[in-house]
Amino acid sequence: MHEVRMGITVVLLISVVAGLARITRGPTLADRMLVAQLFCTTAVAVLLLLAADPGAEALRDVALVFTLLAPTVVITFARYRAPTGAGP
């Protein structure tokens, strides 16, 4: 089972490399923000896969921190990109 988890982890890390290529080619800030979300989601998945190993339970706490950080980054980005003087 350990080999399966490591294989999935490698596939996820390959998706991060593809995201890095998108960052360099991304024409807009929104494209780069989506890749940042991909990084955060992938980090959570990798950490949870690695936390399944005995003795690595603390990685679940780190994954929780990343999970809570992701929406905060999106909200900050949305407030930063919102037009000034916009009403409800």
Image (spheres, helix red, strand yellow):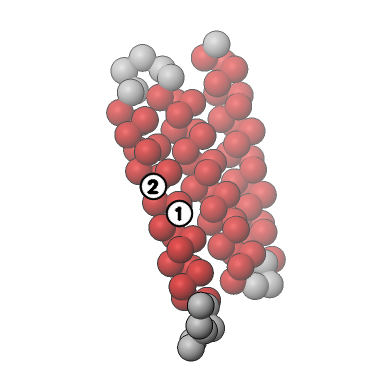
Instruction: Classify mark 1: residues with Cα within 10 Å, few (<14), some (14-19) or many (20+).
Output: few
Residue 22 against residue 51 in the figure, above or below: below
Label pair 2/1, CB-CB below 8 angstroms: yes
Q: Position of residue 56 (x, y in %)?
A: 34, 23
Quarter of image, res 31: bottom right
- Depth check, front residue: 31 or 16: 31
Residue 27 against residue 9 in the figure, above or below: below
Residue 52 against residue 47 in the figure, above or below: above
Residue shown at 50%/33% (left/top)? 46
**Marker disc for residue 71:** 1
Q: How many marks?
A: 2
Quarter of image, res 58: top left
Residue 59 against residue 26 in the figure, above or below: above
As helix, strand or loop, the secondary structure at mark 2 comes to helix
Q: Position of residue 8 (x, y in %)?
A: 60, 27
As helix, strand or loop, the secondary structure at mark 1 comes to helix
Pointer 2 residue: 68
Residue 24 visible? The answer is no
Residue shown at 47%/38% (left/top)? 44
Residue shown at 49%/26% (left/top)? 49
Among all residues in the image, which is located at the extreme bottom? 85
**Marker disc for residue 30:** none
Residue shown at 48%/68% (left/top)? 77
Residue 41 visible? The answer is yes
| Residue type for callout 2 | Leu
Q: Position of residue 76 (x, y in %)?
A: 43, 67
CA gap between label 2 and label 1 equals 6 Å
Q: Considering the image in quadrants, where does the N terminus appear?
A: top right
| Residue type for callout 1 | Pro
Residue 73 is left or right of residue 9, and the answer is left
- Depth check, front residue: 3 or 84: 84
